[in-house]
Image: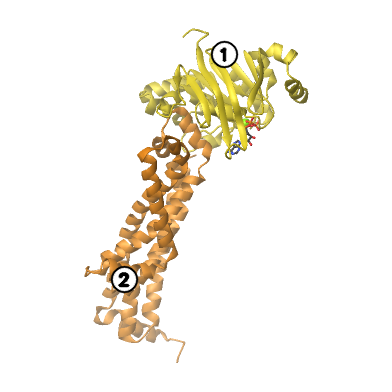
């Protein structure tokens, strides 16, 4: 795959609630290329989560199109489950499967969906766990881990499917401050390894350090987008300036 | 009327009610009938409960996305959901004695033996409660568990199978056990359709010996022992399940 291949393409995406009374997304257009780390920022309620969750159709858009690797996944006839295998997602609330231990959390999908043998899936899982420094937790249950550990394992669980893109919805917002760093470290390492990432976050440091593009949203649309250093140094729109003056 | 029964009196009473005419056999027969009816009704109830809960919760979960696609699947699921709702309303809105009488004298009026009718009637009754227990269990599992599984690429049914149902089952086990206990006691109305269950056996002895105390207290004690035994077993099962998570 070429570095400038368009991985995700979003055309005039709208998501309305309550028969149009709430316009969570009001015509979003954007392209995400392989290898990009796109950071989405914006005030609360501006539609960041709705946009991110539309990308794997956890949220059904009201109208508009989404193309993933050239296929229009908003087409009702398409088998979305197959495409979701290639789109990893990490949630604010971690959402590890409470009934399974860590190893089973990671190997379940590769074994059932990719038909990996238990041996192969376990080997991959242990390698990934070692990469985030949690190999000793393989036989623990989610309830026995700290938030930071849980989130690192949630990242590993998504990576075990060997996705082409990873979506993060405020992955550090539910963490105690002292655990934010360990999760950001894993995400930065992932970004440097070339993974395509779309990240909703309030961590401006992360955006500056590894982001290749910042999308600033407000009122259900992308108001402004730019390369991070340029964006933070000289935001073009008044709304972006107002927002940054509040959070920086 | 004497309240203080002497020890000799007690023995005589016991002999009269249980030994003479082998009347203990009635109690035993009644107990067996009670256990049989409960066991079969429980199985019927769980089967109905699983099906109804599955229909109701998959309708709730999928109606949005299925409506978009439309088609025969959505129509079938809506119809099934409507049928389930009617069933739940009727069963939970009428007394189980009345349901039993309707089953025996109207629906299955050609059947001679009341026992299978009671099994079916209690099973249909219990199914309504079990269905709501299962459904509340499924709803009690955090939505995030569902989304995480779907985001990995699992469909609706595998998500239920690997992630939601195992957690829901653990959550509903106490309520399910309670329903089991309610069911045992509820079968005591089986006498209304001529079945000699445990309660009826005690009552028959009372009618024969004209002494109420011994047979009725004995029946009560047997029910109590059954319930205590069940409570203990369920507690053990719950602890076992919880330990598996540690
Ligand atoms: N199920 C829903 N029903 C009605 N309105 C909704 C629903 N979900 C989201 N919204 C509305 O859509 C808008 C966008 O929500 P969204 O969660 O995408 O915002 P966000 O940018 O992620 O905010 P935050 O930073 O607080 O997470 C908000 O105004 C929200 O109230
Ligand atoms: Mg959000």
Residue B232 seen: no
Residue A216 image point, x, y percent: 67, 21
Alpha-carbon neighbours of circle 2 within 10 Å: few (<14), some, or many (≥20)?
many
Q: Position of residue A53 (x, y in %)?
A: 54, 29
**Mark 2 lies on residue:** B197
Q: Residue at x 39, y 35 (%)?
A: B158
Asked if labels 2 and 1 touch by Cβ distance under 8 angstroms, the answer is no
Question: CB at mark 1 closer than 8 A to ligand 1?
Answer: no
Question: Which chain did the image draw in orange?
Answer: B
The residue beneath circle 1 is: A36
Chain holding disc 2: B
Q: How many marks?
A: 2
In the figure, the shade used to draw chain A is: yellow
Most foreground residue, A28 or B57: A28
Same chain for the residues at labels 1 and 2, yes or no? no
Mark 1 belongs to which subunit? A
Q: Secondary structure at mark 2?
A: loop
Task: Identify the residue at image location x=40%, y=46%.
Answer: B78
**Picture coordinates of residue A150 (x, y %)?**
56, 30
């Amino acid at each position: 795959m070429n570095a400038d291949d368009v991985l995700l393409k979003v055309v005039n995406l709208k998501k309305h609630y309550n028969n149009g009374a709430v316009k969570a997304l009001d015509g979003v257009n954007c392209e995400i290329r392989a290898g990009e780390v796109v950071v989405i920022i914006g005030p609360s309620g501006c539609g960041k989560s709705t946009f991110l969750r539309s990308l794997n159709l956890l949220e059904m858009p009201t109208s508009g199109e989404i193309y993933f690797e050239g296929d229009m996944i908003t087409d009702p006839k398409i088998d979305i489950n197959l495409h979701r295998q290639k789109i990893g997602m990490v949630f604010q609330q971690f959402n590890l499967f409470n009934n399974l231990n860590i190893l089973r959390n990671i190997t379940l999908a590769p074994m059932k969906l990719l038909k990996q043998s238990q041996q192969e899936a376990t080997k991959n899982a242990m390698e990934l766990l070692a990469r985030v420094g949690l190999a000793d937790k393989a036989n623990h249950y989610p309830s026995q881990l700290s938030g930071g550990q849980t989130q690192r394992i949630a990242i590993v669980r998504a990576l075990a499917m060997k996705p082409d893109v990873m979506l993060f919805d405020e992955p550090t917002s539910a963490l105690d401050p002292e655990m934010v760093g360990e999760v950001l470290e894993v995400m930065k390492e992932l970004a440097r390894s070339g993974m395509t990432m779309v990240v909703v976050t309030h961590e401006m440091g992360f955006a500056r350090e590894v982001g290749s593009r910042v999308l600033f949203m407000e009122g259900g649309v992308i108001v402004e987008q730019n390369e991070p250093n340029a964006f933070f140094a000289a935001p073009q729109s008044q709304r972006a300036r107002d927002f940054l003056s509040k959070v920086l | 009327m004497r309240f203080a029964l002497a020890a000799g009196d007690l023995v005589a009473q016991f002999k009269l009610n249980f030994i003479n005419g082998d009347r203990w056999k009635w109690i035993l027969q009644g107990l067996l009938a009670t256990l049989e009816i409960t066991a079969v009704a429980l199985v019927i109830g769980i089967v109905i409960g699983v099906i109804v809960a599955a229909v109701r919760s998959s309708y709730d979960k999928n109606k949005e996305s299925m409506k978009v696609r439309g088609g025969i699947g959505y129509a079938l699921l809506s119809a099934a959901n409507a049928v389930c709702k009617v069933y739940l309303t009727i069963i939970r809105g009428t007394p189980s004695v009345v349901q039993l009488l309707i089953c025996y004298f109207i629906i299955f009026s050609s059947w001679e033996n009341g026992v299978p009718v009671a099994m079916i009637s209690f099973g249909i009754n219990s199914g309504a409660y079990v269905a709501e227990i299962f459904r509340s269990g499924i709803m009690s599992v955090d939505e995030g568990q569902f989304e995480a599984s779907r985001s990995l690429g699992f469909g609706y049914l595998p998500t239920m199978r690997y992630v939601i149902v195992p957690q829901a089952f653990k959550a509903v086990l106490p309520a399910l056990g309670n329903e089991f206990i309610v069911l045992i006691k509820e079968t005591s109305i089986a006498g209304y359709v001529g079945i000699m269950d445990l309660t009826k056996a005690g009552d028959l002895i009372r009618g024969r010996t004209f002494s109420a105390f011994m047979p009725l207290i004995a029946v009560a004690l047997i029910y109590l022992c059954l319930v205590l035994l069940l409570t203990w077993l369920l507690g053990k099962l719950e602890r076992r399940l919880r330990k598996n998570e540690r």
